[in-house]
Amino acid sequence: MNIGESMDRKGLTVCSRCIYDERVASIEFDEEGVCNYCHQVDSLVAQYGTGLPKGEQSLKEIIDRIKQSGKGRKYDCVIGVSGGTDSSYLVYLAKEVWGLRPLAVHYDNTWNSAIATMNIRKVLDGLGIDLYTHVVANKEADDIFRSFFLSGVAELEASTDLGYAYLLRRVAAKYSIEYILEGHSFIEEGITPLGRNYFDGKYIRSIHRQFGSMAMRTYPLMTFTRFLVSALFHRVKFIRPLWYIDYAKDEAKEFLASRYDWQYYGGHHLENRMTAFVHSVYLPQKYGSDMRNNTLAARVRNGAMSREDAWREYNTPPFMEDELVNYFKKRLGLTDELYEQVMSAPGRNWTEFPTYKKRFERFRPLFHVLAKANMVPMSFYLKYCFPTKAPA
């Protein structure tokens, strides 16, 4: 059976180029059946010159500016590290290939896997790079996670993503560093569609106030004001070097393993146990949403995987660590009954809670200027500053 036949049997309209189907939020198809997300990737390749001489030259000019900005300082850039492939490889490129002096920053939500912790140590020790770690108090972190779980929204790990982003800004300001390098590759990961993955500081605070029980004292909450102050006054610039170069994740894994004894952790985003729960259990079981399609679709677009193999993998159950659900329930103090009650209840949308979304849309011209100047991530501008339908 070919891929077209298998998709027809599911009764789905599927992109003729990748494997995104009609269930993906805000998806549209052109007359040739190609989805708008494939066109978005093509637009980014043209804009950034990804893997082309144009991209390499642009990145070289950026690196020269980073070195110039860091003269007389101990560090010239900040890089967030998780123990995963992309960030691990990025610190290697920054130090050994580009000659930068990075400060590695890790946001510890206390749910790291042992493999991730060891990977961070091995790579940074091997490169001689300093590490700045911010640890959120474990009971506080768990209270925030618990509040999101009880709320029934899909963005269970929103606090980690936003907390990490604000931590990078805070550290850059603390050490007067003008550049933050992020290990994201839209070629390997795509741009996650805006649907059930919205989050901002107001959203996190509103859900925690309603369902949480502890004050947020160690959590680095990025409010709208803090966001603008960082962008407009600290003027830190976010650079995603992997958007410019020819980057292949499989080759990076092999290199890291041979050079630093780095270990793979079983799947995309599975280096953290909370992230693993979200991707392997929570989203598939409660929302029927499998985020693996982001990476699988990207791999089809870049020729690293056939559509048939990607569709087949997408339609097999995701990898799940033994005892992961029990670990989740125990840490968050959930009885079996309460856990089943939340998991079986209808999901709720981010639109049901206060957010900054309308404010981001009103300020779209400003954020467009800031994105062009790398003072806010371009992905933020593309995903958050335009009207979007809420997920069904």
Image (cartoon, rainbow, N blue to C red):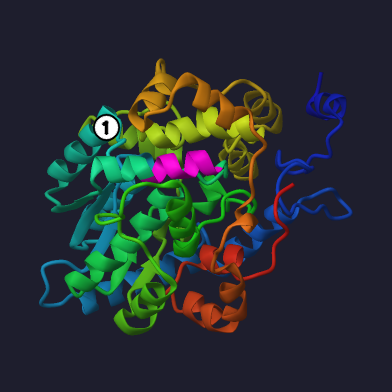
Image point 58% across, 51% down: which residue? 192
Near-viewer residue (200 or 180)? 200
Report whether 245 appears left or right of 384: left
In x, y percent, where is residue 21? 76, 40
Q: Secondary structure at mark 1?
A: loop
Image point 38% across, 77% down: which residue? 231
Report whether 170 appears left or right of 32: left
Main secondary structure of the magenta stretch: helix
Image point 46% across, 61% down: which residue? 244
Residue designated by label 1: 262
Quadrant of res 258: top left
Quadrant of res 120: top left
In x, y percent, where is residue 313? 62, 25
Q: Quadrant of the N terminus?
A: top right
Residue 148 is covered by the magenta coloring: yes
Q: Which residues are magenta?
A: 144-151
Residue 278 is covered by the magenta coloring: no
Circle 1: residue type = Trp
Where 109 sits versus 376, above or below? above
In x, y percent, where is residue 69? 23, 78
In x, y percent, where is residue 143? 36, 43
Near-viewer residue (214 or 145)? 214
